[in-house]
Amino acid sequence: MGFQIRVLMMLGMSLCLASIVLAKQGTSVFYSRPYLPSACYSYRDQGIMIAGANPTLYDNGKVCGRRYKVRCLGGTNGTPNPCKAGEITVRIVDLCTGCGANEINLSQDAFSRIANIDAGRVRVDYIQV
Ligand SMILES: *[C@@H]1O[C@H](CO)[C@@H](O)[C@H](O)[C@H]1NC(C)=O
């Protein structure tokens, strides 16, 4: 294999590892419609793939508009296999005052794409994209 190919492969692998390391683990809850108003955008509609950030992540609104990729990792309360395959990308539009540390409040539309809503709360990881 040529040197350049090997360098590219190493780079690819380290980027992959970095994204695993930097993804934060936490939990997700969800909220249902109507999604307006939101703390970031008031009555300006940002679609349905949206989420509220816990107070730390919200950081006085600095996180507004940032996009996060979220994956379901498992249940929190014994619900068997609540996760669905795949991941979603949501835009932060709201402050979730009731969220705990590393908790994300997904729209029901977003939550239901990665997990069974009957679970109510699931373990996730998330990373800014
Ligand atoms: C999730 O967000 C909705 C809408 O802002 C809010 O009513 C609800 O209390 C939040 N959930 C938690 C656990 O705080």
Image (tube, rainbow, N blue to C red):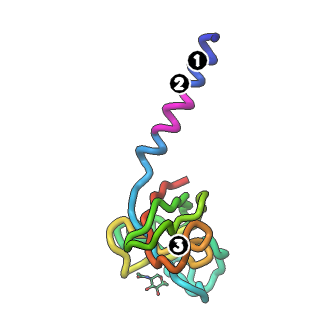
Span colored in magenta: 10-17
| Residue pointed to by mark 1 | 6
Q: Quadrant of residue 107?
A: bottom right
Q: Sequence-wise, which precedes: disc 3 or disc 1? A: 1
Instruction: Determine the CA span between mark 2 and mark 3.
Output: 34 Å
Instruction: Please tell me the numbered disc located at residue 10.
Output: 2
Question: Which residue occupies the extreme top position in the image?
Answer: 2
Q: Residues within 10 Å of mark 3 (few under 14, many from 20)?
A: many
Q: Residues within 10 Å of mark 2 (few under 14, many from 20)?
A: few
Q: Is mark 1 within 8 Å of ligand 1?
A: no
Instruction: Determine the CA span between mark 3 and mark 1.
Output: 40 Å
Q: Is residue 79 above or below residue 71?
A: below
Q: Is residue 12 above or below residue 74?
A: above
Q: Quadrant of ligand 1?
A: bottom left
Residue 60 in sight from this viewpoint: no
- Compare residues 60 and 115 and report the one nearer the observer: 115
Amino acid type indicated by mark 2:
Met
Please name which of the two marks, 3 or 1, marks the residue nearer to the observer.
1
The main secondary structure of the magenta stretch is helix
Q: Residues within 10 Å of mark 1 (few under 14, many from 20)?
A: few
Quadrant of the drawing holding the N terminus: top right
Residue 16 in sight from this viewpoint: yes
Question: Which residue occupies the extreme front position in the image?
Answer: 80
Instruction: Verify whether residue 77 appears in magenta.
Output: no
Which SS class for mark 3?
strand
Q: Residue at x 46, y 59 (%)?
A: 73
- Compare residues 42 and 52 and report the one nearer the observer: 52
Q: Quadrant of residue 36?
A: bottom right
Q: Is residue 108 left or right of residue 121?
A: right
| Residue pointed to by mark 3 | 51
Which SS class for mark 2?
helix
Q: Sequence-wise, which precedes: disc 2 or disc 3? A: 2
